[in-house]
């Protein structure tokens, strides 16, 4: 193996254009050398997905949360600062898997790509719109394989939905309603004084590196382990948590690139913490063969009205989506499109049975893991479905929903200029970062 392929490429500064040397070419049965950034929580899924590969190094700020992963791989070196891990091991690595909280996705992902490494990053891809667009630029500049971890993009159900819509079974899709019970009690709706009083930092936590690029805040137990999603500095409400899953099918099938406007409905809006519940409406213009479309997002247990032809229980489940056309409606329960069905009246069903569903036209995947999908692509297999070109507009959609939820303002968005008609909202496009964490600016010059 040519372990010298990245000699001289990186020494603590960003790579210059044209300096990237492609990584080694692997056969289908060769093992990849993996770096894990974030070994607890969702990171354990990534560790499990590396079972047939080589794990070279771990980076995690919380030794308690990461302990199960460390115990399974006791000889693998451990770091609390992912930058030190990458500096030490980038010549050995092929791919990096990022499972940190949302606010550090960008920094870790960009650092891996700058070193010529393929990368997997959990959803949502980034914490703000500028970060997402910058990672897209970086992916093209450094020519590395990349994927965002929205598992449902690997499932058969999402392919069925796209095939049904493409075949015209719904007519024109005019409205989508998606709902979630999240944020879960205990981490989604913090109460009490702000900012929170300082508490002693646990010895098992590197608090400074946990905050990463976000302006410093004193430690308080109200942020960890999952409660960070409730604070705008670190998360993007329930839409940031689950929007890339729940809206993935309609985003793909209906070409949802950039909405004209976004508006949130709630009783109270908070600029410091996420609100307890609310509704967000996205308005899309006509797009190619698609007519104008309204997407409504319900969170915090709010739900749309139960359809008349709904024969799957007395109530809608805690999470799901309705894709409404001028002829029929698609429904799937849960956050991912695993079991979609077409809702229709008995009269419509009688006539529909005389027609044939479209033949499958989109290849099905044997593995339903985006990590495995990326590994296969690195080894010369098919292109992944949720690469950054796909994931960036989807993440942007969720970021726009978060801005609407945060401010309560009408968000008229111009995706070309990356600006809002209301200039006061532009500060949310690229949020401030701490000194020393301002990477990626050079990609815009």
Image (cartoon, grey):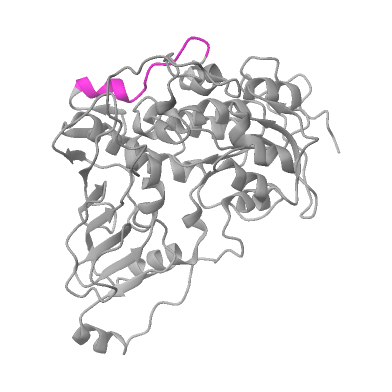
Q: Position of residue 229 (x, y in %)?
A: 39, 34
Tell me which corner region of the image, top left, top right, bottom left or bottom right, holds residue 400. top left
* Residue segment shown in magenta: 423-436
Q: Nearer the viewer, residue 410 or 408?
A: 408
Q: How many marks?
A: 0
Q: Nearer the viewer, residue 344 or 287?
A: 344
Q: Is residue 211 above or below residue 46?
A: above
Q: Residue furthest top?
A: 435
**Can residue 144 be seen at all in this image of the molecule?**
yes
The N terminus, quarter of image: top right
- Left of 74 or right of it: where is 444? left
- Identify the residue shown where x is 27% and y is 73%: 313
- Identify the residue shown where x is 75% and y is 52%: 52
Tell me which corner region of the image, top left, top right, bottom left or bottom right, holds residue 74. top right
- Identify the residue shown where x is 51% and y is 31%: 105
Magenta span contains residue 230 = no
Q: Position of residue 380 (x, y in %)?
A: 70, 51
Q: Position of residue 389 (x, y in %)?
A: 47, 42
- Identify the residue shown where x is 35% and y is 63%: 333
Q: Is residue 217 above or below residue 160?
A: above
Q: Is residue 269 above or below residue 241?
A: above
């Amino acid at each position: 193996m040519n372990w010298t392929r990245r000699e001289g490429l990186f020494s603590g500064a960003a790579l210059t254009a044209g300096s990237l040397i492609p990584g080694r070419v692997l056969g289908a049965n060769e093992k990849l050398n993996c770096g894990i950034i974030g070994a607890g929580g969702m990171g354990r899924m990534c560790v499990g997905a590396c079972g047939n590969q080589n794990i070279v190094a771990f980076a995690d700020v919380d030794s308690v949360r990461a302990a199960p992963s460390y115990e399974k791989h006791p000889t693998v070196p451990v770091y609390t600062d992912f930058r030190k891990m990458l500096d030490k091991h980038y010549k050995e690595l092929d791919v990096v898997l990022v499972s940190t909280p949302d606010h550090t996705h960008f920094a870790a992902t960009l650092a891996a790509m700058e070193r010529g490494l393929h990368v997997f990053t959990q959803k949502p891809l980034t914490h703000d719109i500028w970060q997402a667009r910058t990672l897209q630029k970086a992916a093209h500049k450094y020519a590395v394989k990349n994927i965002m971890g929205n598992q449902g993009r690997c499932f058969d159900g999402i392919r069925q939905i796209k095939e049904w819509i493409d075949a015209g079974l719904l007519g024109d899709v005019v409205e989508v309603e998606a709902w979630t019970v999240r944020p879960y009690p205990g981490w989604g709706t913090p109460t009490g004084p702000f900012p929170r009083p300082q508490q002693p930092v646990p010895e098992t936590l590197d608090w400074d590196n946990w905050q990463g690029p976000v302006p410093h805040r004193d430690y308080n137990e109200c942020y960890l382990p999952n409660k960070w999603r409730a604070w705008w500095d670190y998360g993007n409400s329930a839409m940031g948590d689950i929007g890339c899953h729940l809206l993935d099918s309609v985003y793909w099938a209906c070409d949802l690139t950039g909405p004209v406007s976004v508006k949130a409905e709630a009783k109270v809006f908070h600029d410091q913490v996420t609100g307890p519940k609310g509704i967000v409406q996205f308005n899309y213009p006509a797009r190619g063969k698609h007519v104008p479309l309204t997407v409504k997002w319900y969170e915090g247990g709010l739900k749309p009205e139960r359809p008349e032809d709904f024969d799957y229980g007395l109530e809608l489940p805690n999470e799901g989506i309705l894709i409404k056309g001028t002829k029929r409606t698609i429904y799937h329960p849960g956050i991912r499109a695993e079991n979609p069905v077409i809702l229709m009246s008995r009269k419509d069903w009688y006539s529909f049975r005389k027609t044939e569903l479209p033949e499958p036209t989109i290849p099905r995947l044997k593995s339903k893991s985006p990590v495995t999908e990326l590994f296969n692509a690195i080894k010369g297999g098919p292109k992944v479905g949720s690469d950054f070109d796909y994931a960036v507009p989807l993440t942007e959609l969720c970021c726009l929903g978060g801005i609407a939820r945060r401010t309560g303002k009408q968000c008229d968005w111009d995706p070309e200029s990356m600006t809002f008609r209301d200039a006061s909202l532009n500060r949310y496009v690229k949020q401030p970062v701490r000194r020393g964490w301002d990477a990626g600016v050079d990609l815009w010059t």
